[in-house]
Amino acid sequence: MSIVTKISYNALGLLLNGIARLPFGALYAISDFLYVLIYRVVRYRVKIARHNICSSFPEKSKNECREIERKFYKHFADYIVETIKLLHISDDEMRNRMKYYDVELVDESLSKGKSSALYAGHFANWEWLPSITLWTKYSHETVSFGQIYHPLKNKWFDSFMLQLRERFHSKCISRTDSLKCLLREKNSGRLSVTGFISDQHPAPNDNKHVLRFLNHDTAFITGSELLARRLGFDVYYFDVVKIKRGYYTTTIRRITTDSTIQTPGAITDAYVALLEQSIERQPELWLWTHARWKNPVGNAAHTPIAIKQI
């Protein structure tokens, strides 16, 4: 890294730290500016987002789809400043802004000596989900809290995002090391609670599970399900609702406490059904700028099962 590059990154780090110290009112003023810049000026992936929204909701009018699109970019700008705020936010303020319900389900699994997998999507502010550690009765000193992540190619930004994501003592586990790390925890006798964001498009060499999702035949990754079944995890879902700007609730939904006996695909089916329900409830909160359906995946084998514990 050249001296100029180091100076630039140091300056960027100081700027982001300064922004993170601002009160939320000032942050949302910045967000309003970012919304205009991203959506109206740069038009960041607007064609992709527009196509995804319209094709996912064919029953909606053009005006209704444009309203979802506009609200999405407003929320996306909020997501950016809220994520930066993780550098300087107190535990009390985070508890006030991200309230958890039914965390007792995860605590119950831990009390029975069982680790858990918690499914989420790129929905609402997924970077705030690790604050579950502020709500469980178990300490990070006795239970390993973590989330699977994809390391960024840019080392500086990767380090910066790790700092944010581990703010609440929930460690990041590289996707390529996930099985090794979780096996090591299990073999050591230490319980774990691990988050999985599983709505990414599978890599070409990944196992795929094709489902009908948002009016598209959609391939889902199955690695998280394979890990849960192999390690005997109880499986839950982060059901997030945005109450108003900067305030969310997350309810823990049980998917299964018998992962080892589930047929292949059943856990993914249940997760996809729950995720689709969340998106249909507040469609502007999903990450529509991802080219989710760029490549054909063949026909879905079946429709996601009804939302229920399996």
Image (cartoon, grey):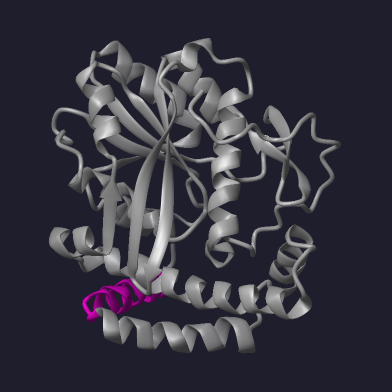
Q: Quadrant of the N terminus?
A: bottom left
Residue drawn at (80%, 35%), measured in percent from left and top? 300
Query: Residue 207: where, in percent of width, then height?
Result: 68, 27
Tell me where residue 174 sits by quadrant: top left
- Residues in magenta? 3-23
Query: Residue 148: where, in percent of width, then height?
Result: 43, 38
Side (left or right) of 175 relative to 13: right
Q: Is residue 112 above or below residue 23?
A: above
Main SS category, magenta section: helix
Residue drawn at (63%, 63%), measured in percent from left and top? 288
Please tell me whether residue 61 belongs to the stretch shown in magenta. no
Q: Could you say which is closer to the camera, residue 283 or residue 20?
A: 283
Q: Is residue 212 above or below residue 214?
A: above
Residue drawn at (75%, 69%), measured in percent from left and top? 60
Query: Residue 217: where, in percent of width, then height?
Result: 79, 43
Q: Could you say which is closer to the camera, residue 241 or residue 174?
A: 241
Side (left or right) of 207 relative to 148: right
Count of numbered marks:
0
Is residue 205 visible to the viewer in this orientation of the structure? no
Tell me where residue 156 sits by quadrant: bottom left
Please tell me whether residue 7 belongs to the stretch shown in magenta. yes
Residue drawn at (13%, 33%), measured in percent from left and top? 141
Query: Residue 158: where, in percent of width, then height?
Result: 42, 54
Q: Is residue 221 above or below residue 246?
A: above
Is residue 288 visible to the viewer in this orientation of the structure? yes
Q: Could you say which is closer to the camera, residue 57 or residue 90?
A: 57
Q: Is residue 46 above or below residue 36?
A: above
